[in-house]
Amino acid sequence: MSKSRKVLIRIIQSIAALVLLIVGFLYLTGNQHVIKGVQLVYLQGKKTANIDDYKDFEYNTVLSKKPQPWLQHEMYNKIPLTDTLTHELERFKSIGFFVVKDGEALWEKYWDDYSDESYTNSFSMAKSIVTMLLGKAIEQDYIKSLDQPIIDFLPEFKDDKFAQKCTVGDLSAMTSGFDWVEDYYHPFDDTAKAYYGSNIEKQMLGKGFNKEPGKHFDYTSGTTQLLAIVLQRAVGISLSQYLQEEFWQPMGMENDAYWSKDRKDGMEKAYCCLNSNVRDFAKFGQLLLQNGNWNGRQILDSVFVEKMVTPNYAAFQKGEHARYGYSIWTDYEHSPNFYGLMGHLGQRVIVVPSENLVIVRLGHEKDKRNMGRGFQDTDAYYFVDEVMKMLKENNLLTSQQNAEKDSIPKSTISGHRNSS
């Protein structure tokens, strides 16, 4: 055997030994999730989880039953996007953009071979949906109220002095004080372990609380996952089944959905990973806009909806902008006011109440530039402001229409009503 071949063999053996050592270390330290993360992220040329990765995980199917397609607005896809909005959508690799005005589809576009039936990851938009499930569980008396202590459902924390004071409402409002580090990009982070690990319930119940609940806003995925465990124990069925029965089928979703799980017999990754499409995601925004009512049926209590979309001012310190209600992001200082479901990599369902408007954007990246506005990520403002320009230029603003009605003599309005 030649000397060079012997050297090559030694190098290969050394690399193999190093890999085995690293793998052994990861298992010994309980970080074996890193192996799956490396396989699904770095070896795929990515830096973080991606919108198409539901195929890489086990999942529960949320079945559609009687689809209710969106009605088309008379101006459907007849209004050109502004150059600014087009640039924003294309620069950050959007795959779908959908605008609903007055309950009808006004504008819809897809990129890169995606369509209205393509499945993509909701990421943290799922947090808002979990809180909708919480509202339903309270309505159905599975849970007493937002003020019920979590230890009623999570006795594992009965000796934790902070957990003893934590309520289910604190979990929804991100004021729980749960000990969690939020970072999608760090392979040893809590969130990465929850995403790529195989026992998310064990991970949640193995942690603790490090702050007084109710006093500080601290956005963490683990908090929503705890809420999911509470819901599953309170209702007695999986989140997917509960979502299917109480929202997905009653709202006539057009397609099934897939909610990713930690393992085959495990539970949903509730803080993220509800895989659907722009048209069905939009219906959650429309449901909030309609105060929980869907085609005459009260799907979600209107008082609870109001609670969701109202900033939880008590959780923010003096000088801070209150931007979060109960699992809903808000900006009531911007004109027009808006709120919405927001997710990793720029997944957005934005509601503009004054204009009866819902805007959905899904895509591979988000605009991280901080331009001194309410949210650190500026894309939501581009979507709202540019769509408003489109509506104004085409005389579709609700405020414009109301102004025109107000300018008509009352006798004319009355006569029209009588004739109809």
Image (cartoon, rainbow, N blue to C red):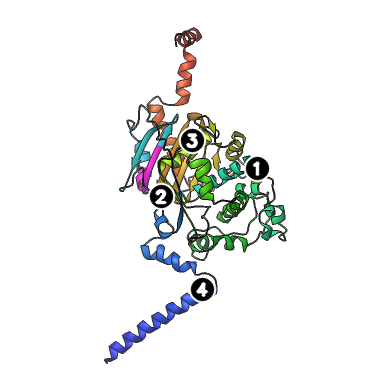
Q: Which residue is mark 3?
A: 286
Q: Which residue is mark 2?
A: 120
Which amino acid type corresponds to the residue marked 1 in the rendered image?
A: Asp
Q: Position of residue 138 (x, y in %)?
A: 63, 42
Say which residue appears at 50% left-offset and 73% top-offset: 26
Q: Is residue 186 left or right of residue 119?
A: right
Q: Residues within 10 Å of mark 1 (few under 14, many from 20)?
A: few
The local secondary structure at tag 3 comes to: helix
Task: Give the foreground label among 2 and 1.
Answer: 1
- Nearer the N terminus, badge 1 or badge 4? 4
Decide if residue 367 is in sight here: no
Q: Residues within 10 Å of mark 3 (few under 14, many from 20)?
A: many
Q: Which residues are magenta?
A: 87-98
Q: Residues within 10 Å of mark 4 (few under 14, many from 20)?
A: few
Front-most of residues 144 and 217: 144
- Nearer the N terminus, badge 4 or badge 3? 4
Mark 2–mark 3 Cα distance, whole angstroms, equals 19 Å
Say which residue appears at 37% left-offset and 35% top-offset: 107
Mark 1–mark 4 Cα distance, whole angstroms, equals 42 Å
- Nearer the N terminus, badge 2 or badge 1? 2
Say which residue appears at 61% left-offset and 45% top-offset: 320
Q: Which residue is mark 4?
A: 27
